[in-house]
Image (cartoon, rainbow, N blue to C red):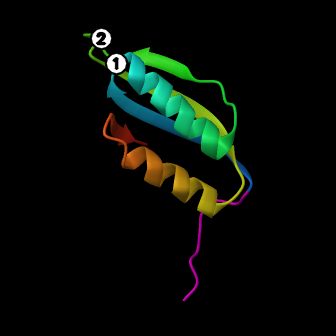
């Protein structure tokens, strides 16, 4: 059985990462994203009370394997609460 994908690679892929708004969170996310997808511009949006922050990217993804590895690493990082 072959895996079907709705995505065609390469593609521009939107990614949102959420966590507590702490200095190490932003740096850690940037390091992970850069290691998998290269430099990308980030948009930061704090929560109403300032406790959380979402970081949004649009990344150029070349393959399903690249995307899966990025999601795996972000999802296993303690500081990351959600990856969408």
Query: Which secondary structure type mostly characterizes the magenta part of the structure?
Result: loop
- Work out whether residue 64 can be spotted: yes
The residue tagged 1 is 21
Q: Give the camera-side residue of 18 and 12.
A: 18
What whole-number distance in Å separates the C-alpha atoms at marks 1 and 2? Answer: 7 Å
The residue located at (74%, 54%) in the rendering is 10
Q: Is 71 positioned to the left or the right of 39 in the image?
A: left
Q: Position of residue 37 (x, y in %)?
A: 66, 43
Count of numbered marks: 2
Under tag 1, what secondary structure? loop
Residue 63: within the magenta?
no
Tell me which segment is drawn in magenta.
1-9
The residue located at (58%, 32%) in the rendering is 57
27 in relation to 70, above or below: above
Q: Is 75 positioned to the left or the right of 38 in the image?
A: left
The residue located at (40%, 23%) in the rendering is 24
Residue 6: within the magenta?
yes
């Amino acid at each position: 059985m072959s895996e079907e994908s709705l995505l065609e690679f390469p593609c521009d892929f939107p990614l949102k990462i959420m966590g507590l708004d702490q200095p190490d969170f932003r740096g850690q996310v940037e390091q992970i994203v850069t290691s998998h997808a290269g430099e990308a511009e980030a948009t930061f949006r704090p929560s109403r009370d300032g406790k959380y922050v979402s970081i949004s990217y649009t990344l150029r993804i070349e393959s399903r394997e690249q995307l899966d590895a990025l999601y795996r690493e972000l999802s296993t990082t303690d500081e990351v609460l959600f990856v969408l």
